[in-house]
Image (spheres, helix red, strand yellow):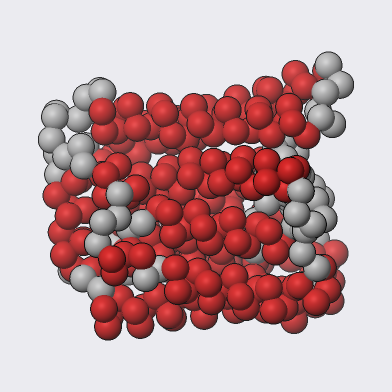
Amino acid sequence: MVRRWGFVASVATAVLVLGVAMAAHPSLRNEIAAEFDVLFLVSWAPPVFGGLLAWILVKALGSREQLDRRIEAAMEGHPLDRELGWLALCLLGFLVCLAGLTEILRVYETAVNTDVAVAASFASRMLFLLVLPILVMDRSGITLDGRGTSMPGIAMGASEPWRWLGLVPVAAAVGLTGYVLVPHTGLPEPSYLLIGVLLAYAAVSVCEEVFFRSMVQTRLETRMGRWGGIMATSLLFALVYTLLTPFDRFAQLPGAGMVHDLGLAMLTYLPSSVLYGYLWTCFRNVWVNVLLRIGLFVLLVPSGLGSAVV
């Protein structure tokens, strides 16, 4: 049975949020009008192009039906609604932890120290978006009766060659973004700082992609349908980065107010997250998503690698 209600509700929510933000902030309307061509080419064209390539490759060379059956088997025995509740608590814990650590750093006037701020951001993600969710969902048995502990192996151990075809749309999306941006912004100079920040961002991406795609989206797909799960997870992803803006070195919205930034997130973080979600549902390979995020990260923030993120 095809379930469209989740997709329709998620799209309607995104449109409503954007509409309210534009009505409440004329400056946002002016920003969109002034930068519409760049916004389209950077935020919307790569996800559309990459998603189309992923669809073609899966249709021609993939075995998504068989992979979906493996996912269904992995979810068997999971109390999905209860687990979604645990995941929501973990996400709340992450937000509270990072905000608290940031305020402590500010009190001691160390928030300007990139190394300390990045370490706090990474530690919060590692604990609340990776370690605790894996313990609760798939290993400890707290919410599980002992069946269906194979999801981590599926997500992070893609052994079938066709599941690495996702690198083709990744290269296409990164290439298109680079074609638009590099002539204007250039590329970052190779340095030990660049390597360190890229490694930190790679670790952040692993935590987030395991949490948002492997855990949250997979469960929402079961409840809301494939595209409902993709869109609902993407909305959540955009909201989280909006809330993180005042506290996180890896979040980069202008900080012009919650409504303004959330509206802007609907035009930037949301389409990127839709591509992450679609790649996940096609290939179920976390490493494809992580490589895409690293590639976009390098292109979009070449002059401030320590303070921004895609």
Question: Residue 23's image quarter?
Answer: bottom right
Q: Measuring from the top left, give residue 209's x and y in whole percent.
A: 46, 48
Residue 296 as seen in the image, left or right of residue 300 = left
Residue 294, placed above or below residue 39: above
Picture quarter with the C terminus: bottom right
* 64 vs 219: above or below: below
Number of marks? 0
Horizontal side of 28 relative to 309 (left or right) equals right
Which picture quadrant has residue 184? bottom right
Q: Is residue 63 positioned above or below 216 on the image? A: below
- Please state which of residues 164 and 45 is positioned toward the viewer in this rendering: 164
Residue 109 in the image: above or below residue 261? above
Q: Position of residue 31 (x, y in %)?
A: 82, 69
Residue 92 visible to an observer of this rendering: no
Q: Quadrant of the N terminus?
A: bottom left
Residue at x 80% of width, y 68% of height: 186
- Residue at 20%, 37% in the rendered image: 149
* Left-right relation of 16 to 263: left
At x 15%, y 59%, the residue is: 69
Measured as percent of width and height from the top left, residue 101 is found at 68, 23
Given residues 196 and 9, the one toward you in this image is: 196
Position in image of residue 257 (x %, y %) = 78, 48
